[in-house]
Amino acid sequence: MTDTPPRGFFTLIHHDGPVIEWSDDITERRRVIDRNKPEHERATRHRCIQYIPESMIPALYAAWAEYQLAKGPDCDYELATGIAYAEYERVTGLAYATYKRVLMDRLNDQTVISRILALIPDCPWNGATIFPLEEG
């Protein structure tokens, strides 16, 4: 599609939002659209997925990075028990709560949302969907 990073925050990954969402592999989402979504929706879906540069939402990228750091590398968390697991849950829970707070702050900031939606050519987003003409 475009020369954008495969991971990061993107606009409207799903037709009904949210406007800002993280993806570890946006190319996989694009493949799902091409394989599984109705043909008449594909161009709109692809057009609405735009990479959001860190410079537009630096606090959100920072909060996500802190959460990922708290989670640590992938491992078998089923082996962690008792106090160790409780501490892991506490630390990651705090980091995730911070990330969600920053995300919600950005989603509720209409100035931020307007700048982000401006990344999408002829953006069809009506606040609820990218397919407003198909609502029944």
Image: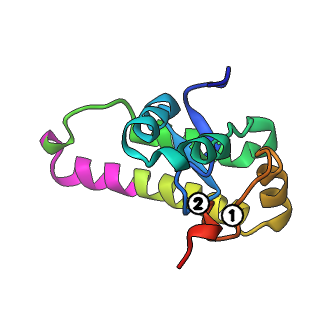
Q: Amino acid at mark 2?
A: Pro
Quick check: 127 above or below 119? Answer: below
Left/right placement of residue 112 relative to residue 98 reads right
Q: Position of residue 113 (x, y in %)?
A: 77, 59
- Tell me the crowding category of disc 2: few under 14, some 14 to 19, or many 20 or more residues within 10 angstroms, Cα based: some
Q: Earlier in the sequence, mark 2 or mark 1?
A: 2
- The quarter of the rendered structure image containing the N terminus is top right
Quick check: 6 above or below 110? Answer: above
Residue ID for mark 2: 18
Q: Is residue 89 magenta?
A: yes
Which residues are the magenta region? 79-90
Q: How many marks?
A: 2
Residue ID for mark 1: 107
Q: Position of residue 20 (x, y in %)?
A: 63, 53
Left/right placement of residue 103 relative to residue 115 reads left
Q: Is residue 132 magenta?
A: no
Closer to the camera in the image, 130 or 75: 130
Q: Looking at the image, which residue is at 69% across and 63% down?
A: 107
Query: Residue placed farthest to the bottom in the image?
Result: 136
Q: Looking at the image, which residue is at 42% across and 52% down?
A: 91
Of badges 2 and 1, nearer the viewer stands 2
Would you identify the image quadrant in which residue 18 lies? Answer: bottom right
Q: Looking at the image, which residue is at 72% across and 59% down?
A: 124
Query: Residue placed farthest to the front in the image?
Result: 40
Query: Residue placed farthest to the top in the image?
Result: 3
Name the secondary structure under disc 1. Answer: helix
Dominant secondary structure (helix, strand or loop) of the stretch shown in magenta: helix
Contact? badges 2 and 1 (CB < 8 Å): yes
Left/right placement of residue 26 relative to residue 117 reads left
Q: Position of residue 110 (x, y in %)?
A: 81, 67
Closer to the camera in the image, 106 or 134: 134
